[in-house]
Image (cartoon, rainbow, N blue to C red):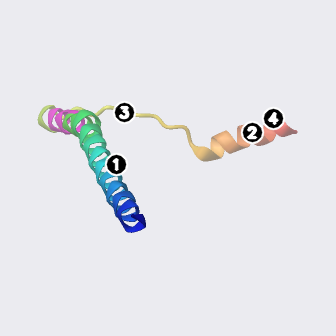
Amino acid sequence: MASTVKEKITTGTAVVKNKVNLYTEKIAVMIVTTCVIPICVLLLGIWIIKTILGLSIPVKLPQASKILKKNEDDDE
């Protein structure tokens, strides 16, 4: 009697582990197909357009040294 209960618990645990693994894989596939692939396609399209048309899109990023100097001035 005790051995059958132990076997059922072991079997049930294995089934639950397999289902959780399957759901995790399905969620990972869903995230990749709905988020990662479209972003990659968009970036590739922008890169191709920039290459064909010879466009340069200037992007100004703040320099870390200027940000740090502003923060030091605020502290004083």
| Dot placed on the residue nearer the N-terminal end, 3 or 1 | 1
Residue 8 percent coordinates (x, y): 34, 58
Between circles 3 and 1, the one closer to the viewer is 1
- Assess disc 2: are there few (<14), some (14-19) or many (≥20) residues with their C-alpha within 10 Å of its C-alpha: few
Q: Which residue is mark 3?
A: 58
Residue indicated by mark 1: 20
Q: Helix or strand or loop: what does disc 1 sit on?
A: helix
Q: Which mark is residue 74?
A: 4
Q: Secondary structure at mark 2?
A: helix
Counting other residues with Cα less than 10 Å from the Cα at mark 1, is it few (<14), some (14-19), or many (20 or more)?
A: few
Looking at the rendered structure, the kind of residue marked 2 is Asn
Badge 2 is on which residue?
71
**Residue 30: quarter of image:** top left
Residue drawn at the location 29% of the way across and 38% of the way down: 31
Q: Measured from the top left, where is residue 64 in percent x and y? A: 60, 45
Which sits in the foreground, 8 or 57?
8
Report whether 67 appears left or right of 60: right
Reply yes or no: does residue 13 show up in magenta: no
- Closer mark to the observer between disc 1 and disc 4: 1
Please tell me whether mark 3 or mark 2 is closer to you in this view.
2
Q: Which quarter of the picture shows residue 66? A: top right
Q: Earlier in the sequence, mark 3 or mark 4?
A: 3
